[in-house]
Amino acid sequence: MYRSVQTEPMKGDPPMSAALELQSYSLLDDAECDERIDAAKKKLGDRMTILGHHYQRNEVFKHADHTGDSLKLSKLASEDDAEYIVFCGVHFMAEVADIVSRPDQKAILPDMAAGCSMADMANLANVERAWRELSEVLDPDEMVTPVTYINSAADLKAFCGRHGGIVCTSTNAQQILEWSYSRREKVLFFPDQHLGRNTGYRMGIPLEEMGVWDFGKPMGGLTVEEIKAAKMILWKGFCSVHQMFKPEQIDAWKEKHPDGIIISHPEASFEVCEKSDHVGSTEYILNTIRAAEAGTKWLVATELNLVNRVAEEMKPKGVLVEFMSTTVCMCATMFRTDPQHLCWVLENLVAGNVVNQVKVPTEEAWQAKKAIDNMLDVSVAAGKV
Ligand code: 13P
Ligand code: SF4
């Protein structure tokens, strides 16, 4: 559970009243929440924007003013004028919204327990230790660009900002790696080994030149020779949702649908991505399937809420969309945001109370912003946003 900050009212804020208790919202049914959310949105008008990630469940997703993947939502947060940015997503997304928005804007996460298990696989102590250990073999500040996937805590983005590094998302990983290699000869990529490996391999980096850094072991479990030979050092992190997808599931489905098309998120394993016809971000997956011709069949390796929604949308158009895994695998932390929490934060805003604000400490935010701005600049130049 992440801590929220209690902020003092700013000049011009409505007077604060006692915060409305979350407990009284937990028993509301979804229909009542819908009505109250709509009413609160009307009252708040353009003082508040709701951003919704594609993995949000329908009951929440339908209330979003804008939806998108991590990159699109970061860009929207950097441009939005609203006083309050309510992020229906996970904690690192709300942190990014806080970092890229103006100091007088407030980022709010409806449920502070909505984290990301992959982001939790890298922490600052372990990354700093890796940097120290690498410096026993080479000069990392001369030779290694640290690249953090956006699915990481703000202090890791700040680490990248301090060390000439950059943030990436699943949309721009290739352009970010190109930027990184144009500066230094190696990359330390964290926390998701799969996004790093899948992207690097497609850019022509052989698997033998990718070392996996096991953060539980001294020197990441690598020898001096392995570190010297590695073009890319991949943190041993992964997404618990995307690791459920297996190449055998593709083979079994292909037997039933030999002409079917496979589309996967790059957090899926190397073996799954290699067997896929398309690999890309959540926004890319949606846009690709939405452009599909009638009669086509798609097997999708990404989170269940997105897949179910696009399957329903495409059914009347004669496009079959199926989920890759045989077991249900939702992102449990994305699922934590429910209409009850959303209603609670909005009605508090109407009452003049900011609850569940996500605020990154100023110095850390400033350093993290450097790495995020690097990413946004590269993404804009590449036409990715
Ligand atoms: P996207 O940037 O593709 O939306 O991915 C975010 C994420 O958390 C996927 O698991
Ligand atoms: Fe994190 Fe995986 Fe959930 Fe994405 S799907 S938010 S990477 S746990």
Image (cartoon, helix red, strand yellow):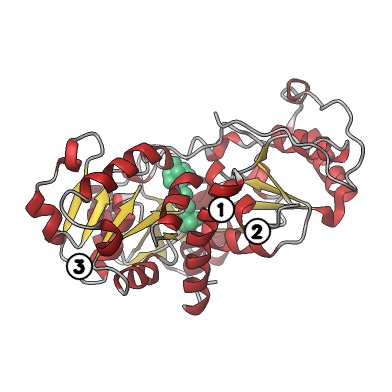
Tag on residue 205? 3
Please provide percent x and percent y for residue 94: 60, 47
Mark 1, ligand 1, within 8 Å: the answer is yes
Does residue 135 appear left or right of residue 338 in this picture? Answer: left
Q: Are marks 1 and 3 in contact (CB under 8 Å)?
A: no
Please provide percent x and percent y for residue 342: 72, 38
Label 1 vs label 3, nearer the camera: 3
Give the Cα distance between marks 2 and 1.
16 Å
The residue beneath circle 1 is 54
Q: Are marks 2 and 1 in contact (CB under 8 Å)?
A: no
Does residue 151 appear left or right of residue 27 in this picture? Answer: left
Query: Type of residue at label 2?
Result: Ala
Residue depicted at x 51% and y 61% = 370
Tag on residue 77? 2
| Location of residue 123 by image quarter | top left
Query: Type of residue at label 1?
Result: His
Q: Nearer the N terminus, badge 2 or badge 1? A: 1
Circle 1 sits in a helix, a strand or a loop, which is it?
loop
Residue depicted at x 56% and y 41% = 91
Question: What is the quadrant of the N terminus in the image?
Answer: top right
Please provide percent x and percent y for residue 324: 36, 49
Please provide percent x and percent y for residue 85: 71, 50
Give the Cα distance between marks 1 and 3.
31 Å
